[in-house]
Image (tube, coloured by chain):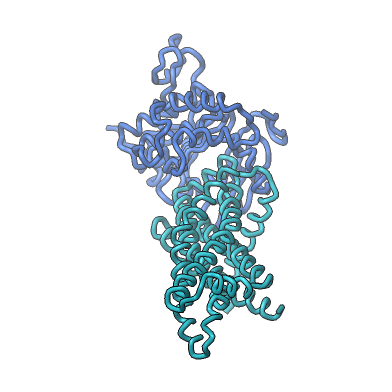
Amino acid sequence: MLDFLKPPVAAIQDFFGLAGLALRNVFRAPHYTDDIALQMDIIGVGSLPIVILTGFFSGLVITMQMSRALAQYGATGQVGQIVAITLARELGPVLTALLVAGRNASGIASELGSMKVTEQIDAMRALGTDPIQKLVTPRMIATAVMLPLLTIIADFVGLCGGFIIASLTLNQSASEYWTSAYQALEYNDIVQGLLKPFVFAFVISLVGCFYGLRTSGGTQGVGRATTEAVVVASVWIFVITSLLTRIFVNLT
Amino acid sequence: MPAPQSDSPAASLLRMESVTVSFDDLVALQPLSFEMQAGDTRVVLGAAGSGKTTLLKAALGLVKASRGRVYLFGQDITDLGERAMYDIRSRVGVLFQEGGLFDSITVAENVAYPLVNSKRLHLPPAEVDHRVEDALRFVELEHTLEKYPGELSGGMRRRVGIARAVVTEPPLVLYDSPTAGLDPITANTIMALIVRERDSQNTANLIVTQRYQDGQVMANFRYNRSSGQLEPISPNGSAANHGSNPRPTVFMVMKEGGVVFEGSQAELEASTDSYVSKFVPKHS
């Protein structure tokens, strides 16, 4: 029984060890600013098209579904409000995080995994640089900065998608839709809408790095590490969003 | 360069005292001791999985010794933290099995890496460029500066790896299977480079290999600085030889994590052990 539990417990311990070292390195020299900028470009700018596309269509779809449901109560005027709240609180952060997890947790895991199996990580240590400082911390900082920004963009584009449906099928005017959307949002929504992606960013980057750095067994191992990173990061995104939502619902 | 801390004779570059490495239940390295001083050459022969690479990694502290002590430049690194080790590691040159080059940056950036990222050296960019070019010229690859490692052949990657290992002019260089997977001609070029590096900089070399010929080249040839050629070492040091002969090469044969032979080339060739003699080609 205990032997059965040992590997997962050891893995969790290793993960938090890595997370601790990566966080500590934020405050320690040397800072690899070039690497941070490069990762921001890959993770942030690189994810922009897919995030805009998904954000737009999710806004579109919510509005279509909601306008039908709201029509039963004659409350289609509320559609902007519903789209704004669902996007800002839940769908914006979670969808963006899932996309970035699929795109970048896998990218990070496969890149670091390939480096591990071709001895580049060992070479880095042998040449006197800390792989956590050089590889993990820049990815973590870049994701923590870019994911909230991507989420804001996804939220906004989603609202725009909602507006297109609202104006085409519900004949709402721009001021009607946007006022309803704007007035629905409270500080609480904004805070949780930005806190969630910030927390998800650590999950995505650290899970990607963790599975990448513990890759073993050649090319096949890289594939396995990539898959595990995406699956584990996605699961944790759902678990964490449930916990955070629970906390914020209680706060209001 | 800071003076080595002396809790052992000053000239000792690498000393391993009954070092054991085990991963969980698997013993990767059985108790093993040796010492290397400036100008020493040590060739470690062994089949795949015999613990050769583990030996190199233990020498650098990349793998922690489970028992025994490892000294680099006279300093005990066995229980040193990872961060404290970076500085001392950066004074050792390493060539990894497949070169270990960073494939996301260019050849020039690879070779510059140890210069740029060492806390010990603070070189102006012009000096870095100059040293990188020198190191690449040494391995005759000065035309590949802007290429990426993926665009080079296996032999060229190995040569870039050597350039990166020696660019900081380390007193000790570790080579992990420098000729593995190369054709005999390229392998000979690589070995000639290693001999040339050893004799022009007087570095100590620890070479891990499956090929007896590699050790044979290290033991019997030296680089003549005035002629720029490799020449056989004459036993009595003839007048034509400028400079002294390198110190005699020590051979070590490993089997399943343990050392089964240690001695000179003559002793190796005379060995009757069936495993040891497998590495030595039989002369008619």
Residue pictured at 57% horizontal, 50% vertical: B63
Q: Position of residue A197 (x, y in %)?
A: 59, 65
Query: Which chain is in cyan here?
Result: A
Do we see residue B31 in this rendering?
Answer: no
Residue pictured at 60% horizontal, 58% vertical: A144
The image quadrant where one finds the C terminus of chain B is top left
Query: Which chain is in blue here?
Result: B
Is the residue B76 above or below the residue B169 in the image? Answer: below
Do we see residue A235 in this rendering?
Answer: yes
Query: Which of B142/B11 is in front?
Result: B142
Q: Position of residue B259 (x, y in %)?
A: 50, 46
Is the residue A49 above or below the residue B230 in the image? Answer: below
How many callouts does the rendering have?
0
**Res A188 quadrant in image:** bottom right
Residue pictured at 63% horizontal, 42% vertical: B86
Q: Position of residue A59 (x, y in %)?
A: 48, 72
**Res B157 quadrant in image:** top left
Q: Is residue B16 left or right of residue A234?
A: right
Q: Position of residue B159 (x, y in %)?
A: 41, 33
The image quadrant where one finds the N terminus of chain B is top right
In the displayed orientation, state which residue is furthest to the left: B284
Query: Which of A2/A17 is in front?
Result: A17
In the displayed orientation, state which residue is furthest to the bottom: A72
Is the residue B18 above or below the residue A178 in the image? Answer: above
Residue pictured at 54% horizontal, 57% vertical: A209
Is the residue A157 above or below the residue B169 in the image? Answer: below
